[in-house]
Amino acid sequence: MTAASPNNPVDFADLLAFYASAGADEALEDAPVNRFAEAAPKPAERMPATPRESRAAEPPTAPPRLDARALPDAPAARPPTSAVPDEAQAALARQLATASVTLEELRQHMAAFEGCNLKATAKNLVFADGNPQAAVMLVGEAPGRDEDIEGLPFVGRSGRLLDRMLAAIGLDRNSVYIANVIPWRPPGNRTPTPHETEICRPFIERQIELVNPKVLINLGGPSAKTLLNTSEGILRLRGNWRVHTTASGIAIPAMPTLHPAYLLRTPAHKKLAWRDFLEVKAKLRALG
Ligand code: URA
């Protein structure tokens, strides 16, 4: 690839294609920023020595946009930044989640929440799809490009495979409820960081509690590890019943299985997922 020049639009097309294939498919700002042109700090403008000092030196923040601050004892919310989210945001997420007594309230609190940096690059909140009264709830990792555009989980290629897997045991989107651990698409579909997962964890945990399904299906390792509190790999976990315990102590049988995106790349393992789904079918029959 040759260097892009303003006189050659074809070069720019190549450059954009290169960026997209490298996963850089989102713009973070409306206008380009020339970082090379930014002035070097003058000696008098020394960098603060510690993060704590750095925070203390920040100007007072503008009034937050988050409705959640109206909640009693809500910790201070900061305006959205691309910095790594901190424990205060996780604490706020926990408060909002606990304060949500319906799924609609939870959705509204999540939509107003500014504490997860992934929201800044996502087009939509991907809250859920399916039937909130369903006996089966499936939880994936995080939305991809198609889900971000439509605001619904599992609507892309892996979603179409998931629909076929569900149909194989007599289920469809009217008889299951589907959500993700992370409700905002990570830019370029990168893996969510542990911080991002911890910030979002209270929301998905509350969502499970409010749906209160008879059976939970964890789609892939990140969902299983986050919601079953284990560090075991998905190939070891899958196929064995575990328990997800909600904050109020409800124990929900959980079946970890392989993620449909993994199955698209590794079709030889579809038979394993098929066995896991048969387990779910048998469990539903046993639970009545
Ligand atoms: N993968 C996921 O984990 N979730 C989605 O919604 C789509 C793809």
Image (cartoon, grey):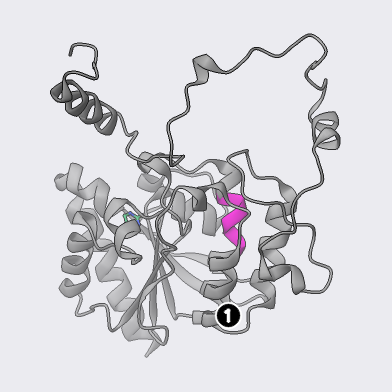
Which one is nearer the viewer's eye here, 152 or 70? 70
Query: Which image quarter: residue 149?
Result: bottom left
Estimate how packed mark 1 is, as few (under 14), some (14 to 19) or many (20 or more) residues with alpha carbons within 10 Å: some
Residue at 61 percent across and 51 percent down: it is 198
Residue at 46 percent across and 40 percent down: it is 29
Q: Secondary structure at mark 1?
A: helix
Q: Main secondary structure of the magenta part?
A: helix
Residue at 69 percent across and 64 percent down: it is 94
Whether 148 is drawn above or below 234: the answer is below
Quarter occupied by the N terminus:
top left
Q: Where does residue 65 sit, x and y in percent of width and height?
A: 66, 62
Q: Which residues are magenta?
A: 197-202
Q: Where does residue 223 sit, x and y in percent of width and height?
A: 45, 55
The residue under label 1 is which amino acid type? Glu
Q: Where does residue 227 sit, x and y in percent of width and height?
A: 53, 59
Residue at 76 percent across and 73 percent down: it is 70
Q: Is residue 247 visible?
A: no
Whether 189 is drawn above or below 166: the answer is above
Which one is nearer the viewer's eye here, 221 or 49? 49
Q: Is residue 39 visible?
A: yes
Q: Is residue 269 left or right of residue 66?
A: left
Which one is nearer the viewer's eye here, 50 or 219? 50
Q: Where does residue 133 sit, x and y in percent of width and height?
A: 41, 87
Which one is nearer the viewer's eye here, 11 or 164? 11
Residue 200 belongs to magenta span:
yes
Q: Quadrant of ligand 1?
A: bottom left
Per the image, the residue denoted by label 1 is 105
